[in-house]
Amino acid sequence: MSVDKEHPEYTAHIDRWNMYRDAANGEHAVKAKSETYLSKKSTSQSTDEYNAYKQRAVYFNATGRTVDGLVGLMFRRDPDLKFPKAMELLIEDVTREGVAFGELIKQVIRDAVTIGRGGILVDYPPVSGEVDNLREFERAGSMPYATFYTAESITNWDVTRVGSSMKLRLVVLRETEREQDVADEFNQADVKQYRVLDLEDRGGGYVYRQRVFRKVRDESGREGKSWQAVEEFYPRMRGEYLAEIPFEFIGPSANLAQVQKSPIADLATLNLSHYRTMADLENGRHWCGSPTPVFSGDFQRADGEEVTEVKLGSEGGIQMTQGSDAKFLEFTGSGLSELREAEQEKREMMAVLGSRILAPEKKQAEAAETARIHRAGEESTLASIAQSVSKAGTRILERLRDWYGATGDVSVEINTDFVPTEMTPQELQATVLAWQGGAFSLEDLYWKLKQGEMLRDGKTFEDYQAGLESDGPGLGTL
């Protein structure tokens, strides 16, 4: 069995994932796939005619706008991250490529909304000698890091039962490495490789192992046909081998290895159907605006020679013989009404499937309760994604903390308050009185004020507490 063997679920879903991503990426990505999403009108349609037909088509990117809107709602407030102060440097560059942990979470959420799948591997670069604690990590200039893998790059996996629980046994990740040409400093090539994460059964227990597979080149530089392991190592955490794979699957409703349905699957499918309708509608409009000239009889020049080419327009003239005629064959466009209706119906259906941000503005203000009911389904989906990513993010921080050698609580909490609802003056007064009466703690007060839109974004509990201490009695700076 070769390392490039794909999991059956991967093979069954890869085309759908590509479709969802193309639909979200917009017109350029959709039209680049040509007949994948827009077939020729007929087998006799030439390449030039098809390209003109495709060029006239309009892709209304409801899918991409919906993804942007839903991610924006979840990031209406920055994620609440809790971690030891010793991890600050790591959090600011968690990927070793300048990406902060919050930005990594945003990328994860976008793929959870678009594809419904992704994964994060926690790892650390090899260092010479034994590294057992935080100071040795810092002296070695090495820190653990996290890498996000899209659904398309997670090609194979397996889960096995260990005792009473299920454990991830195998993950195969397809990667692309940029390789420098030794002879030419300006020439680089993409080299495909597979990173295999698995558990090696050593009888008394499992040990986590990594291997990297490539197609090895011969002396002439020709790439071989078979995949070969070019690296093999056993990552250790502070000198100890790991008994599990530090990889987290991320899904829209649960963080499982099994493939889950994309939240925008139905919307993307309908969006591409709308694109095909628009192609036919714009094609019809084009021909409505381009009447076809029709000639009957003979035409000749003043000198009596036969006319073989007729030029239309005021700059030229047509000399007709007795009994000849010239007309325009024009389409009135009444046959386009059904296409217009279909386009409008599909646009409205996309608004329902996607979110209310795609629906036309209503002339009347909507009652608050009605708006809440309309958003209930959307918020339920968003809340599920937020909770799944929060759990996975917390698990990632725990792995980073343990590998880093730091101590203290860690957590990730993604915003689930998607609709701004400011606390009224009466609610604020009642909340403060309840806190002053000992009904709840200062930290509970902070969270209630934050949920009530009474605190500025980015203000942590520590900042709020420090403000209270510096300002003296009262609520401090909101």
Image (cartoon, rainbow, N blue to C red):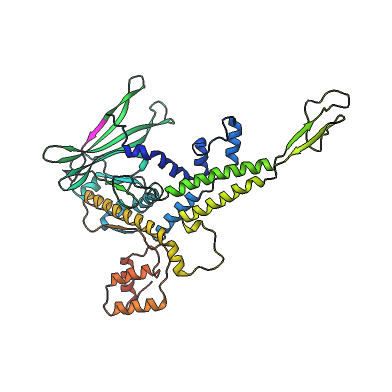
Q: Does residue 430 sit above or below 155 in this rendering?
A: below
| Residue 126 x %, y % | 24, 39
Left/right of residue 368 with respect to residue 209 in the rendered view: right
- Residue at the location (36% across, 38% down)? 12
In the figure, residue 280 lies in which quadrant? top right
| Residue 325 x %, y % | 82, 33
Left/right of residue 79 with respect to residue 143 in the rendered view: right
* 195 vs 135, nearest the viewer: 195
Locate the N terminus and report the quarter of the image it occupies. Answer: top left
- Residue at the location (42% across, 60% down)? 76
* 67 vs 290, nearest the viewer: 290
Q: How many marks?
A: 0
User: Which residue extends farthest top?
Assistant: 220
Q: Is residue 327 magenta?
A: no
Q: Which contiguous range is marked in magenta?
A: 230-240
Q: Does residue 48 sit above or below 466 in this rendering?
A: above
Residue 200 seen by the camera: yes
Q: Does residue 395 sit above or below 307 in this rendering?
A: below
Left/right of residue 194 with respect to residue 70 in the rendered view: left
* 148 vs 383, nearest the viewer: 383
* 249 vs 8, nearest the viewer: 8
Locate the C terminus and report the quarter of the image it occupies. Answer: bottom left
| Residue 42 x %, y % | 57, 33
User: Which residue extends farthest left?
Assistant: 204
Q: Is residue 238 magenta?
A: yes
| Residue 333 x %, y % | 67, 45
